[in-house]
Amino acid sequence: MINRLLKYLDFLLIVFLIGCNSQQNETGVESVQPSTLLISKDNNGHIENWMRSLDSEIVIKICYGLSKDSLNYYLLNADAIIIGGGKDVNPQLYNKPEYSKICGEFDNYRDSLEIKMIQHADNKKLPIMGICRGQQIINVVHGGTLIPDIPTFIDGNIKHRSEKDSAHVIIPVKGSWIDKAFIKDTFWVNSRHHQSIDKLAKGFDVVAYSVDSVIEAISIKSQSSHPFTMAVQFHPEDLRDSLSNRFGRMLLNSMN
């Protein structure tokens, strides 16, 4: 009963949005509609709050749990996509099923959802941002692989995940957008992950590393093939500093 009600409410929202998109003002000129941002899943609402702090008029839709028809509608009307943090990416997706023993929990539905969203962004050349797990699955979708557990595979003193948020410095790659934008040697970031990129997907550049060589940020090589694809291993939605806000505004600016 509840599922039927939710689907009906979702249907009414779609009808309303269709009406809004076709609405014209008194002069007969089509009114300007705010940009629409899709977030795959936002576990605590922090991504949505972060983006609204940068653009109060933006339309935001969380895609996790949407019906197939609703998801297709929102994808067709999206201006940008964010793939957020969450559970581990299933290692079968990068042909390493043996890694399952040292991974955490999986969410196969979410894997399928985000693969569809990433592929749609690629096909339609939509701006897309990855956060934490989002960076990892963007890498996997484009042919890269993951380190399934950093403490098992990498020797180092950095704690990338602990009971409370860890923090460490990242080092921008010379000539990268972070390096050019801030001209700083290091940045402090938060950290709450135990997986990271292993083999980088073809067509991407590393933008920043941690001191133990974990890849902390990536971007697409050529903006001629895609206007904006960037991802970070940390959580800018919880930093709210100059680096994270610059990152968020880059996504918003790419939507115009």
Image: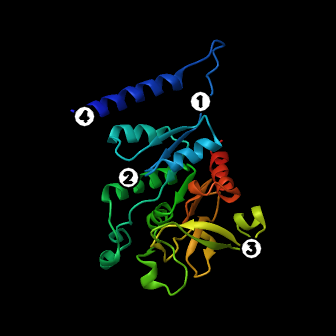
Q: Residue at x 56, y 74 (%)?
A: 215
Looking at the picture, tell me which residue is in the foreground, 101 or 255. Answer: 101
First of labels 1, 2 by sequence position: 1
Give the left or right position of residue 7, taking residue 24 as reference: left
Q: CA distance from mark 3 to mark 4?
A: 53 Å
Q: CA distance from mark 2 to mark 3?
A: 37 Å
Residue 2, relative to residue 133: is it above or below? above
Assess whether mark 4 and mark 3 are in contact (beta carbons under 8 angstroms).
no
Mark 2 residue crowding within 10 angstroms, few (<14) / some (14–19) / many (20+): some
Q: Secondary structure at mark 2?
A: helix
Q: Secondary structure at mark 3?
A: loop
Q: Secondary structure at mark 4?
A: helix
Q: Mark 1 = which residue?
A: 33
First of labels 3, 4 by sequence position: 4
Image mark for residue 113: 2
Image mark for residue 185: 3
Q: Mark 4 = which residue?
A: 2
